Image (cartoon, rainbow, N blue to C red):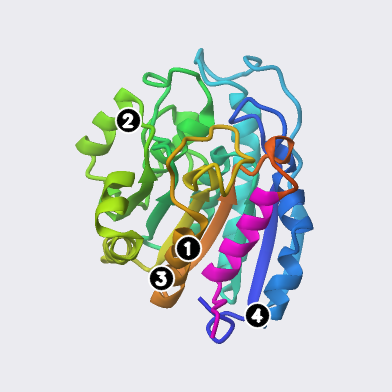
Amino acid sequence: MNPNICKQISVLGVPMDLGADRRGVDMGPSAIRCAGLEARLEQLGYAVQDEGDLVVRRAKAYSSTLPETNMKYAYEIVRVNEELAEKVAAITAAGDWFPLILGGDHSIAIGTLAGVTRYKERIGVIWYDAHGDVNTPDTSPSGNIHGMALAAALGFGHPALTGIGIGSGGVPRIDPRNVVLVGARSLDPGERIFLKQHGVTVYTMHEIDRIGISAVMEQAVRLASAGTEGVHLSLDLDGLDPEDAPGVGTPVPAGISLRESLLAMEILSASGLLTSAEFVEVNPVLDLRNKTAKAAVELIASLLGETIM
């Protein structure tokens, strides 16, 4: 991904904190912008159009018109993701704009992926995250929807989530065999079963330490792109080690370093297969001098073609 391929980037913020049920992450889009995102992208030769932020309304945890469920804030999360799906679909339909979505918590990935796949028959997904996010209401220990996002995008879970952007009768356009989880180090028991049953490739920190991030990402790109029209990156900043990204709601020690992550972004960029991206879970309330948002900008720049030489 570089300005010679796509010269225009559409930035959209989604200040969602309901999926994580923790305040602060709703300020993530502003923190990333304040860390110099637009200027950095313009230096790389891109035209940047900032679409602003979607509106996320406050809600009570279990106030919902949905059937009885343990999913917290389900009604508002579904509403916002439906709107997000339409916005991303419109950006994708334009053809010459690259959608860059800023979160917010990871529940917004449901809407992003629904929008991206509206005009693409099949895409692959690299899910860069310490967590699996493949719980369903039946397996979730918390009821937090940010931990159900990938499962919902694959068509598993409550119909209100799986139908976002495609309707209740829609068929998901993401094949689990084209989904690669990178950086996993905190998986719930139900998630381990799900990932094995459905053929999602998982690179834990064990594989990253053993064969290196370069080999992991090269394999991830190959798997995610096999038979697809491109690859979407969904990057949760808690995929990084808390030393490099302290401002996240669910930090897990012994993660991927910022240096390794920059290389991972460069490898994905060099593939020329990137169709869209989202960066989520930056929480300025928990951060140190906006360190995590600055890391996000560094990663975005590397993903979009920045190199030392």
Disc 2 on helix, strand or loop? helix
Instruction: Tell which of 215 and 276 is nearer to you.
Output: 215
- Disc 1 residue type? Tyr
- Disc 4 residue type? Leu
- Which residue position holds label 3? 267
> Callout 4: 10 Å neighbours few (<14), some, many (20+)?
some
Residue 68: image location, x then y, percent: 51, 12
Q: Is residue 82 above or below residue 192?
A: below
- Which residue position holds label 2? 191
Q: Earlier in the sequence, mark 4 or mark 1?
A: 4
For the residues carrying marks 3 and 1, which lies nearer the camera in this image? 3
Q: Which mark is residue 119?
A: 1
- Which residue position holds label 4? 44
Q: Left or right of 17: which side holds 36?
A: right
Q: Which residues are magenta?
A: 291-309
- Disc 2 residue type? Glu
Q: Quadrant of residue 18?
A: top right
State how far apart marks 3 and 2 are (Cα).
Answer: 28 Å
Task: Check if mark 3's residue and mark 2's residue have beta carbons within 8 Å.
Answer: no
State how far apart marks 3 and 1 are (Cα).
Answer: 25 Å
Residue at x 37% of width, y 52% of height: 173
For the residues carrying marks 4 and 1, which lies nearer the camera in this image? 4
Residue at x 61% of width, y 61% of height: 100
Task: Check if mark 4's residue and mark 3's residue have beta carbons within 8 Å.
Answer: no
For the residues carrying marks 2 and 1, which lies nearer the camera in this image? 2
- Disc 3 residue type? Ile
